[in-house]
Image (cartoon, grey):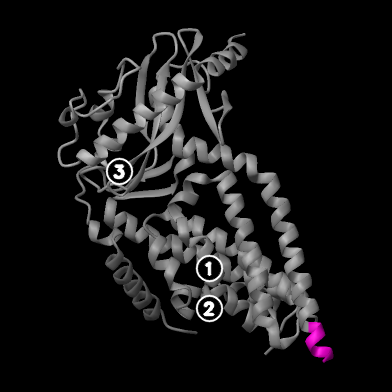
Amino acid sequence: MAKSLTQEFVKGLWDEVPPFRLVLGLCPVLAVTKSVENGIGMGLATTFVLVGSNVLVSSLRKVIPSKVRIACYIVIIATFVTVVELLMQAFVYGLFLKLGIFIPLIVVNCVVLGRSEAFASKNGVLRSLLDGLGIGIGFTLSLAALGAVRELLGTGLLTIWKDWGLTFDIFGPAYKPFTFMVEAPGAFVALGLMLCLMNLVPKK
Amino acid sequence: MREMIKMVVVLTILSLGSGGVLAYLRNNTQERIDNQVLEFVKGPAIRAIFEGATNDPIKDRFTIKDGETERTFFVGVLDGEPRGIALETSGKGYGGDVGLMVGIDVKENALLGVGVTTHAETPGMGAKAKSDPSFAAQFKELSLGEPIKVTADGGTINAISGATITSRAVSSAATEADGIYQKLKSQIEEKLKGIKQ
């Protein structure tokens, strides 16, 4: 029952990695993963919200009356999301434009609310922090991986972070882009194939 | 009853705290965000108009009150003197307002150029007003003081094929900018003197 602190962190990276194992929060997963950069940006924004709301919810878990707990969680989450939104506008406006509506929509991302309700409201601050961090990083890596598959097949490029010049032309100019992958149906196909691959790995 | 009160108190305090944090952050990032918006939304059009400017037109901006509205003017230093100004106007397009950045050469009393900033026109048709530089190039060096029109209306601007409404919107926005410039000319020149030194 009682997991070690390390396990609390590591579980978010594989055993309970949100889009693939929990199959939660699919809306941004499918919509923004046109490039690795978008995936990383979305993932980091979600991680910030996840860690912040997890810590605050768990430290207030004895004060919040159970009847209005969801309302309280939403207030906390919405605050963190707005903080992220303002910071992104101020510092990485280009990325903010690309992610657009999906940043405010983190408020209703069920990964975030799910962790508050299922984990942070029942566990201590340190555990909740590690849980949020683990799940958040797992989410970021999943988005980046999905983004990499789609971008690589769809355009032949890999954009890790455009502002720093980290754009790589992997297949060279001779590659004929398979644009289906960067369109909406490609997101479903790529996600399904990745889920399939992950399930081929035997469980411990 | 006690539980009721506790629920209200907790939610109120949470909301108050949240409001406070957000207001504080908003105040502290407002200026930076405004700059970023200008840079990303209007920056490309402004820089294209002031090609070869030796200053940063987005930094060197001033505002003039025009009746109820406050208008922002961007200043471009060309050939060593601040002779270019740019202002944004809009015209009624096919899919809503077409925002247009209009550059004016104060010394020559002519248009420096125009650039579409925001629009919701049809891709491949009206959207060409922004993506096709040859359309905007027609506005370069047009003299001021008379309405700018597309050829169908008896003017000199060749409309984008299949997008006469968008072309009209751009032309009327440019004409509007000219009107504002003529109206505020003395104040603009006053402000430009301040930048000269």
Vertically, is A196 above or below B85?
A: below
Task: Bin the neighbour count of mark 2 within 10 Å (Cα to Cα): few under 14, some 14-19, many 20 and up.
Answer: some
User: Could you tell whether B197 is left or right of B56 in the image?
Assistant: right
Q: Which residue is mark 2?
A: A16
The image quarter in which residue B50 lies: top left
Vertically, is A99 above or below B10?
A: above
Residue A113 image position (x, y, % from top left):
59, 76
Q: Which residue is mark 3?
A: B93
Mark 2 against mark 3, which lies toward the viewer? 3
Tell me how far mark 1 sits from mark 3, CA to CA. 46 Å
> Which contiguous range is marked in magenta?
B1-6
Which amino acid type corresponds to the residue marked 2 in the rendered image? Answer: Glu
Residue situated in front as seen by the camera: A94 or B97: B97
Q: Which residue appears at 44% of the width and 75% of the height?
A: A20
Q: Residue furthest right?
A: B2
Residue A180 image position (x, y, % from top left):
23, 61
- Describe the element under mark 3 as helix, strand or loop: strand
Which amino acid type corresponds to the residue marked 3 in the rendered image? Answer: Gly
Residue A25 image position (x, y, % from top left):
48, 73
